[in-house]
Amino acid sequence: MENKHNTHNKNSQSRIAFIGAAITLLGGFFLSYNYIEAKRIYAEDYMASNFFQEEKPQQEIEITELEEINEPVEDENIPDVVTNDYIGYLIIPKINLTKGFLDKRAPDNDVEKNIMVVEESNYPDTDKGNLIIAGHSGTGWKAFFNDLYKLEIGDLATVTYNNKKYNYRITNIYKQEKTGKIAIYRDYKKTTLTLITCTNFESTTQTVYIAELINIEE
């Protein structure tokens, strides 16, 4: 009788030890998973922001066109007063993006704070001009262009500016190596919108989206 009682106690202790070991292993797994996931998110955020932190487009962008231009395209209506208020909005229905942008001379016109109008840009009302907007991809609140990778040729984008809607259709999407300069290939006979962001899950390339104006709504 005593031997059966001892055997029962040993079996109970073995089960308790097994359950304790399983809980310990399970807890260790979740701790390891959370640690690895946090590191992954940090790495993606770092890769997405690396280009914009070290190679800001407004300082080092190189514009390369399909055709040579004889005379520079001038902005028709440059605002006299510069503030940190939005002067227009970029709207891309396919990815549910609506984001305001600032005057390119504004202090907060920076990818660390907003989508950024690149210095070499023309505003939308400049005939045959090119509005160039850069933004972050990756994770975090400032990754406004994180879903641009879902866009395809033929998708639509709208820019509202000076009480008008400028509707564009994407005509070209291409990647470039991060070299500190960005070549923009567009048709100089067209009014265009160019969007630039880091390529998702790639630390060495950025993606350029070219869209051509199709109509203007008053």
Image: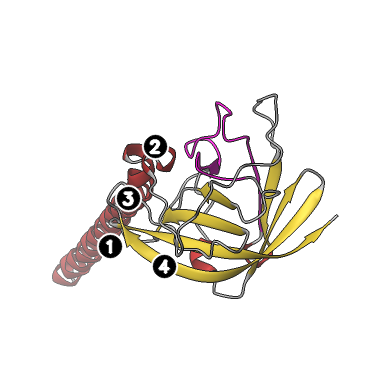
User: Mark 2: which amino acid?
Assistant: Gln
The quadrant of the image that shows the N terminus is bottom left
User: Mark 1: which amino acid?
Assistant: Ile
At 41% from the left edge and 43% from the top edge, which residue is drawn?
A: 57
Q: Position of residue 47 (x, y in %)?
A: 32, 50
Q: Are marks 1 and 4 in contact (CB under 8 Å)?
A: no
At 47% from the left edge and 54% from the top edge, which residue is drawn?
A: 196
Region in magenta: 97-122
Q: Which residue is mark 3?
A: 47
Q: Which mark is residue 59?
A: 2
Q: Quadrant of residue 40?
A: bottom left
Judged by depth in the image, the label closer to the viewer, 3 or 4, is 4
Q: Nearer the viewer, residue 125 or 163?
A: 125
User: Under tag 1, what secondary structure?
Assistant: helix
User: Mark 3: which amino acid?
Assistant: Met
Q: Which residue is mark 1?
A: 19
Check the image and tell me how it is coloured: secondary structure
Judged by depth in the image, the label closer to the viewer, 3 or 1, is 3
At 86% from the left edge and 54% from the top edge, which residue is drawn?
A: 218
Q: Give the Cα separation between the discs numbered 2 and 4.
A: 21 Å
Q: Nearer the viewer, residue 200 or 183?
A: 183
| First of labels 2, 4 by sequence position | 2
Q: Give the Cα separation between the discs numbered 3 and 2.
A: 20 Å
Q: Which residue is mark 4?
A: 174
Q: Position of residue 5 (x, y in %)?
A: 20, 67
User: Mark 4: which amino acid?
Assistant: Tyr
Q: Quadrant of residue 56?
A: top left
Q: Position of residue 191 (x, y in %)?
A: 63, 59
